[in-house]
Image (cartoon, rainbow, N blue to C red):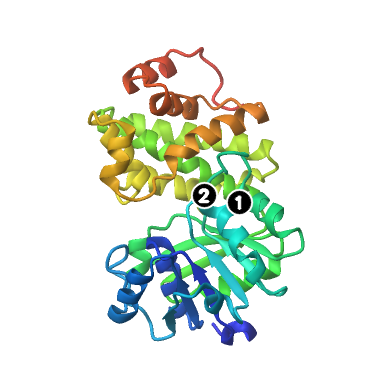
Amino acid sequence: MSTAGNELPVAVLGAGSWGTALAVQFARSGRPTRLWGRDRERLAVMARERRNERYLPSGTFPESLAVEADLARALGGARDLLIAVPSHAFRAMLTGIRPLLADETQLAWATKGFELASGLLPHQVAREVLGPKRSVAVLSGPTFAREVGAGLPTAMVVASPEAAFAQSLAQDLSSTNFRVYTSTDIVGVEVGGAVKNVLAVGAGLSDGLGFGANARVALITRGLAEMMRLGVALGAHRETFMGLAGLGDLVLTCTDDQSRNRRFGLRLAGGGTPAEALEAIGQVVEGYPAARALRDVAARAGVEMPLCESIYRVLYEGVPARDAVRELMTRPIKSEIG
């Protein structure tokens, strides 16, 4: 996949599982890549062992992947920048790097979720912090970092208001076992990435309580309807939610235990508190804060999301999951469509 910009480095900020996996994939595809993280000691170990043993032991670092502990050096001369940090850290990361960015640096992120305080999507936060002129994009879709690190066949989507930027990123990421599709619907792709995390918590709760396959599939399909209603209300295209960043990511996270959000729901179903479940998982569970942010966003948009509302009540109001399901099942009968 040779492009004119391939000789210029890409900087990946965030050395967790997903940031590391994407850095490995850029490097595999022939792009000089720099991976930066906050923990200098861990970075030194990663540079020596040529892998991220803690978060992604399946991903051996290609020769073209450099581990860089100095943020300014990581960004220096980079044409493209990819941010892979949790949603609660996204604004602070943008604010911190703003003085270091060259005018021509293009920005992408793999961050998913509404900002808790404002209810803004990541691209709206980026516009607030960096202004309206910089090229921006989001990477999303049904991807587990471990499988990407291991080089297993994967497909995802990159969305940008600028089709040329999306196409460039897709070319630079794609390889024999990694296919990237493009979209200009950045709102739809970001809404899909935010809502699916909440629904995956619900899927974990449902399965952990033994509600069965019928209930899981009902949650996925009705959850997709809620995701679509909210997305369209916020300006997204309906068809986006039938693609990789909507249905694809939703099915993945609701059905496979590699999903931290699903495992979080399973632990809650086993009798743990949210704090205990979060501690046991030991990594960020985006669906937990996303449930609260999503509730506020849906209320402001005037969109009814009964499944997501029930998950919020279980997480934040202490409503037993069985009671929440009973309430859902006894709601007034209505048409499936509409």
Q: Is residue 120 above or below residue 145?
A: above
CA gap, disc 2 and disc 1: 8 Å
Q: Which quarter of the image is occupied by the C terminus?
A: top right
| Residue lying at 38% horizontally and 70% vertically, measured from the top left | 40
Residue 68 sits in quarter: bottom left
Q: Are marks 2 and 1 in contact (CB under 8 Å)?
A: yes
Crowding near pointer 2: few (<14 within 10 Å), some, many (20+)? many
Residue 266 seen in the current view: no
Q: Amino acid at mark 1?
A: Pro
Between 42 and 214, the residue placed more toward the observer is: 42
Q: Residues within 10 Å of mark 1 (few under 14, many from 20)?
A: many
Secondary structure under badge 2? helix
Number of numbered discs visible in the structure rendering: 2
Q: Percent position (x, y) of residue 238? A: 64, 43
Identify the amino acid type marked 2.
Ser
Q: Nearer the viewer, residue 58 or 335?
A: 58
**In which quarter of the view is residue 24 placed?**
bottom left
Decide: is 19 above or below 223. Answer: below
Establish if 45 lies above or below 296. Answer: below
- Please report whichever mark, 2 or 1, sits nearer to the chain's N-terminal start: 2
Classify the position of the N terminus by image quarter.
Answer: bottom right
- The residue carrying mark 2 is 87
- Reading the image, the residue beneath label 1 is 122
Q: Position of residue 99 (x, y in %)?
A: 66, 68
Q: Position of residue 80 (x, y in %)?
A: 60, 73
